[in-house]
Each structure stands twice: as structure tokens, then as C-alpha cells.
């Protein structure tokens, strides 16, 4: 099962960018991403009485999954970008292996390869991939900053 | 620098996870944990009290415990963030959950 090939959501501006060299860089990425996400204390505007999972944590989880896949299965260098639009936040992970589209594990067990993408698809509002230039592959996950929309997509 | 780790005690039937359990930790610890899980003769208990983050790399380690443990593994002190991951991944039914220990017991059952 493949991830839909689709261009990055338009009208998004880059907020931050990280270059990753190895799996040991993931912890630093997550810490800086969490700090860079807007509405950190309020979990992107999530009401205090909302029992749903904090949106920020879901975004960090998905970034970790996509970055791990790029480091393991893509070609270096690997770059992670945080993009923001009016009511969207997007994680865009770029590697240099455009001929290897991301593959979902389907209903495989969580011990199987590709399960990270399954998690990403469940946690994100939209998941897609695209090519740019001669050698860039983007795998992106888009989140509505309206928490209810993200929870509803699970 | 390691941001997370897993250590095994009690002949491999008690695992303590701490910090951020991701693919980096998985790559360092998976081989030995698979071996311990496959050799387990007692139910495996995993303390998650001090886990601050987990992704599919950590889930894979939990799954190895579920495959090898003679009874469903006990997950002790599961933080809310990790409970969300377990629910999202659909694996919660593979485990038995124990409540968060009292503060005086945090960090290990022998303390």
C-alpha cells in the first residue's frame, strides 16, 4: 500500500529547518520542533477541558516517524522542515531518493517495518509525498491546528 | 549522548525504559531484548514510568516482549503520552496495564 503522491499544501511558509545525519539526531529534532510549534502551552488552542491527545505531541510523533524512515530508507542528506499556513502545520521530510516511494505496512503488526508510516497516517490530517527537482523526495504530513479535526481523522 | 535507554533486570523479566524510546534506542538495544524475550520463562514486566517519548521504534521493543512473554506483558506506570501512542497503534490489547506507582516507588520496583 502506498502513500498518495500529491504536492505539498500550498501557501505554506517555512518556520524552521533541520539537517539530520543519523538516528542520534532525532532527539534534538523533537526538542527543537516542540519548542518551535505555536501555541505550545495551550496545545495549539486546545481547550483545557478537551480530553483529546495534545496536538503538539502528535506532530512531534509524526515528525519522528517520517525522519526515521528517511534516515533508514532514503538517501542523504535528510532535511526536516516545519511549515505553517493560516490554519495548518506541515512536517516536510526531504531525502534524495525519489525513486523509492514511501510504503505503508498495511495491517501489519507494529513490530513490522513500515508501521511508522501507518502511525503517521492515523495521527496526521493528511499524509502525502512528492518529488521536486531532479533528486528530491518529500514525505509530508499536514495537521489542522483545530484539534478536533486531527482527532476526527484518527 | 543517549536520550533514552532500556535496561533489563531480574534475569530479563523486568525491563525499565527511560527517556525517549525511539529508533536510536531500538538500534542499540533490540538484539539483546529480542533474545531476552525469546528466553523468557516468566511474564515480562516493563516499567514506563520515566518514559518521556516513544514512537514506533519503542513500540517494536514492546512488541518483542509481547511475542516472547509467556503471558501478556505488564506495562507499569504508562504516561498519558505513551497511552495515546498505544491506543493510536491498536496494540493496547496485547498488554496488561498497572497504574502509575506511588512517587516513592518510581524508577523501579526495588526502590
Image: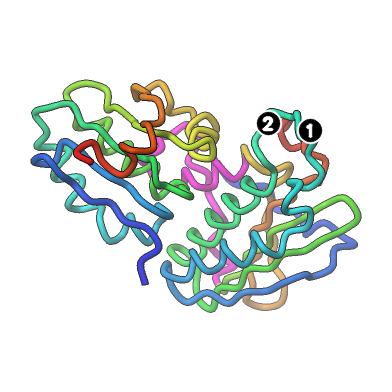
Characterize the local packing of mark 2: few (<14), some (14-19) or many (20 or more) Cα atoms within 10 angstroms.
Answer: few
Q: Position of residue A109 (x, y in %)?
A: 39, 34
Q: Quadrant of the C terminus of chain A?
A: top right
On whether residue A107 falls in the magenta region, the answer is yes
Q: Position of residue B61 (x, y in %)?
A: 31, 44
Secondary structure category for the residue under label 2: loop
Secondary structure category for the residue under label 1: helix
Sequence-first disc among 2 and 1: 2
Residue at the image point whose x is 73% and y is 51% from the top:
A41
Characterize the local packing of mark 1: few (<14), some (14-19) or many (20 or more) Cα atoms within 10 angstroms.
Answer: few
All told, the count of numbered labels is: 2
Query: In the visual, does A18 lie left or right of A21?
Result: right
Residue A52 shows which numbered tag?
2
Q: Which residue is mark 1?
A: A148
**Given the image, what chain letter belongs to the residue carrying mark 1?**
A
What residue range appears in magenta? A97-121
- Our reading of the magenta stretch's main secondary structure is loop
Residue at the image point whose x is 36% and y is 51% from the top:
B18
Query: In the visual, does A97 lie left or right of B63?
Result: right
Residue at the image point whose x is 43% and y is 34% from the top:
B78
CA distance separating discs 2 and 1: 8 Å
Residue at the image point whose x is 47% and y is 43% from the top:
A115
**Given the image, what chain letter belongs to the residue carrying mark 2?**
A
Hey, which residue is sitting farthest front in the picture?
B104
Asked whether the beta carbons under mark 2 and mark 1 sit within 8 Å of each other, the answer is: yes
Query: In the visual, does A28 lie left or right of A149?
Result: left
On whether residue B82 falls in the magenta region, the answer is no
Amino acid at each position: 500500500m502506498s502513500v498518495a503522491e500529491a504536492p505539498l499544501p500550498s501557501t505554506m511558509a517555512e518556520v524552521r529547518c533541520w539537517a539530520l545525519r543519523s538516528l542520534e539526531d532525532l532527539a534534538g529534532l523533537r526538542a527543537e520542533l516542540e519548542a518551535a510549534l505555536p501555541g505550545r502551552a495551550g496545545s495549539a488552542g486546545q481547550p483545557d477541558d478537551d480530553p483529546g491527545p495534545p496536538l503538539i505531541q502528535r506532530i512531534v510523533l509524526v515528525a519522528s516517524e517520517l525522519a526515521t524512515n528517511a534516515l533508514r530508507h532514503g538517501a542523504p542528506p535528510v532535511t526536516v522542515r516545519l511549515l505553517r499556513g493560516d490554519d495548518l502545520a506541515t512536517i516536510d521530510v526531504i531525502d534524495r531518493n525519489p525513486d523509492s516511494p514511501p510504503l505503508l505496512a498495511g495491517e501489519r503488526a507494529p513490530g513490522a517495518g513500515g508501521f511508522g508510516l501507518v502511525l503517521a497516517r492515523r495521527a496526521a490530517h493528511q499524509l502525502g509525498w512528492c518529488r521536486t527537482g531532479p533528486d528530491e523526495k518529500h514525505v509530508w504530513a499536514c495537521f489542522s491546528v483545530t484539534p478536533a479535526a486531527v482527532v476526527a481523522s484518527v | 549522548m543517549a536520550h533514552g535507554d532500556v535496561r533489563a533486570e531480574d534475569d530479563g523479566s523486568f525491563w525499565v525504559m527511560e527517556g525517549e524510546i525511539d529508533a536510536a534506542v531500538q538500534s542499540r538495544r533490540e538484539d539483546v531484548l529480542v533474545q531476552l524475550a525469546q528466553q523468557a520463562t516468566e511474564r515480562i514486566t516493563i516499567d514506563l514510568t520515566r518514559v518521556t517519548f516513544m514512537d514506533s521504534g519503542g513500540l517494536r521493543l514492546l512488541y518483542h516482549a509481547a511475542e516472547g512473554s509467556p503471558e501478556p506483558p505488564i506495562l507499569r506506570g504508562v504516561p498519558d503520552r505513551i497511552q495515546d501512542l498505544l491506543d493510536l497503534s491498536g496494540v493496547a490489547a496485547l498488554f496488561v496495564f498497572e497504574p502509575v506507582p506511588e512517587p516513592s516507588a518510581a524508577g523501579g520496583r526495588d526502590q
